[in-house]
Image: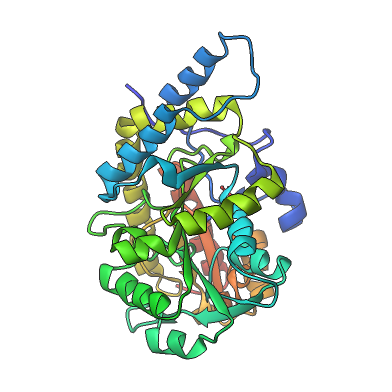
């Protein structure tokens, strides 16, 4: 049986450890920043890769129909969305795909809407491709839950607005968007001829009581104006395989995208990644179920802790293994807040400001670790808070 295995990745080249000195000025922090897990990739995936190595030729290979069918079956079973084989193509990275679609579907000087706070490469890809960043500040209701305001969004649209970048589920705020929210967003984009670029890489990491809905699955019209990014990277902790897919139903958008994609020549990817991708989608289900049970335990541990601490608020993540800690009541500036977590709590978290101005006063904590490590991290924060005189 494929069990969850928690891994101590210190001493390896794992980014979260390797970059500690550079990012936090010290190696003496428990790293809980970059979005991967301290959990071994499913054993069936590793076995399939080992098995492939029995064939000694590692040349150029294309991703097999079986691999794509594996993903199609998974998405159908988990998200009730029937994808056609020809809609899908390989990409080495979701972030690279974001840049590629921005160039494919807009011109320099055009506007791209991004909802802030959000995963920082959203901003970076827009700016580095010389497009104009149109920021939409997410709001919080009285419960602290984030939402976008459709009328404000409408007022932000101009004839130069060509793309809306959607993060669904949303990193870092953990929202799983509701059908009505997605429909209102989709309708607005259809009215204005805006292409929806939906990053759904966290789509499988959704908790009890919430359902991820692919925006492209809502109607034929929305399917025709949406590009969706999908993959095994987050779900099966396979980011290091460098494989994902871009899903485009519209033949017209596909032609534009293929033109840009062939300019970059990222080809069909690495054979070991193809094998891993296929195996994860076809045989990874039992492991994935255990993963979700574990992540839910950690999420609840964190929420209970935040209720006790009170000074740090955490709106329960509906999806993702990322907690968005609201530390504003603490009254520290962003630099001091970061220093507090590094030097007083001994933790390497992502500073909220990196996710946009709206992230000021927040920190993002990755809880895809063992419960023991998570509890230790929370204890460290509690002790540091006591050190500051908070009871
Ligand atoms: C929303 C989102 N998109 C994309 C990525 C990265 O994807 P990739 O490694 O395939 O570029 C991440 C990683 O944290 C993410 O959170």
296 left or right of 354? left
Instruction: Say above or below: 275 vs 115.
Output: above
**Residue at the (33%, 61%) spot, across then down:** 304
Question: Does residue 271 appear in this view?
Answer: yes
**Residue at the (34%, 46%) spot, across then down:** 83
Instruction: Say above or below: 2 vs 247.
Output: above
Q: Residue furthest left?
A: 209
**Residue at the (34%, 27%) spot, across then down:** 283
Quarter of the figure with the N terminus: top left
Instruction: Say above or below: 298 vs 175.
Output: above
Q: Quadrant of residue 207?
A: bottom left
Q: Position of residue 251 (x, y in %)?
A: 46, 54
Quarter of the figure with the C terminus: bottom left
**Residue at the (60%, 49%) spot, across then down:** 30
Q: Quadrant of residue 299?
A: bottom left
Question: Does residue 116 appear in this view?
Answer: no
Q: Position of residue 257 (x, y in %)?
A: 57, 54
Instruction: Say above or below: 145 vs 29.
Output: below
The residue nearer to you, when weighing 208 against 309, is 208
The residue nearer to you, when weighing 350 against 194, is 194
């Amino acid at each position: 049986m494929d069990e969850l295995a928690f891994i101590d990745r210190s001493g390896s080249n794992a980014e979260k450890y390797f970059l500690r000195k550079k990012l936090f000025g010290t190696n003496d922090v428990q790293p809980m920043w970059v979005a991967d897990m301290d959990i071994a990739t499913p054993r069936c995936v590793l076995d399939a890769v080992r098995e492939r190595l029995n064939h000694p030729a590692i040349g150029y290979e294309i991703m097999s129909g079986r691999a794509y069918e594996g993903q199609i079956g998974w998405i159908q079973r988990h998200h009730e969305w029937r994808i056609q084989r020809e809609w899908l193509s390989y990409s080495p990275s979701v972030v690279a795909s974001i840049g590629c679609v921005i160039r494919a579907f807009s011109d320099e000087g055009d506007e791209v809407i991004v909802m802030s706070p959000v995963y920082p490469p959203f901003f970076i890809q827009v700016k580095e491709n010389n497009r104009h960043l149109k920021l939409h500040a997410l709001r919080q209701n009285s419960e602290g839950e984030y939402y976008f305001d459709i009328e404000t969004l409408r007022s932000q649209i101009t004839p130069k607005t060509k793309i809306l970048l959607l993060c669904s589920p949303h990193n870092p705020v953990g929202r799983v968007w509701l059908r009505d929210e997605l429909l209102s967003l989709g309708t607005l984009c259809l009215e204005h001829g805006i292409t929806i670029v939906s990053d759904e890489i966290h789509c499988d990491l959704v908790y009890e009581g919430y359902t991820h809905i692919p925006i492209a699955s809502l109607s034929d019209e929305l399917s025709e104006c949406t590009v969706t990014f999908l993959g095994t990277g987050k779900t099966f902790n396979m980011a290091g395989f460098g494989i994902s897919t871009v899903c485009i139903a519209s033949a017209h958008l596909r032609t534009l995208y293929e033109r840009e994609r062939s300019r970059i020549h990222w080809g069909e990817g690495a054979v070991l990644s193809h094998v891993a991708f296929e195996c994860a989608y076809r045989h990874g289900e039992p492991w994935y179920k255990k993963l979700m049970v574990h992540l839910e335990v950690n999420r609840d541990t964190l929420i209970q802790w935040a209720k006790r601490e009170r000074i740090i608020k955490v709106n329960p993540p509906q999806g993702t293994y990322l907690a968005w800690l609201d530390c504003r009541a603490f009254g520290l500036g962003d630099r001091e807040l970061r220093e507090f977590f590094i030097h007083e709590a001994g933790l390497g978290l992502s500073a909220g400001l990196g996710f946009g101005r709206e992230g000021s006063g927040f920190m993002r904590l990755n809880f895809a670790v063992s419960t023991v490590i998570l509890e230790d991290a929370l204890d460290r924060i509690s002790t540091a808070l006591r050190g500051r005189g908070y009871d």
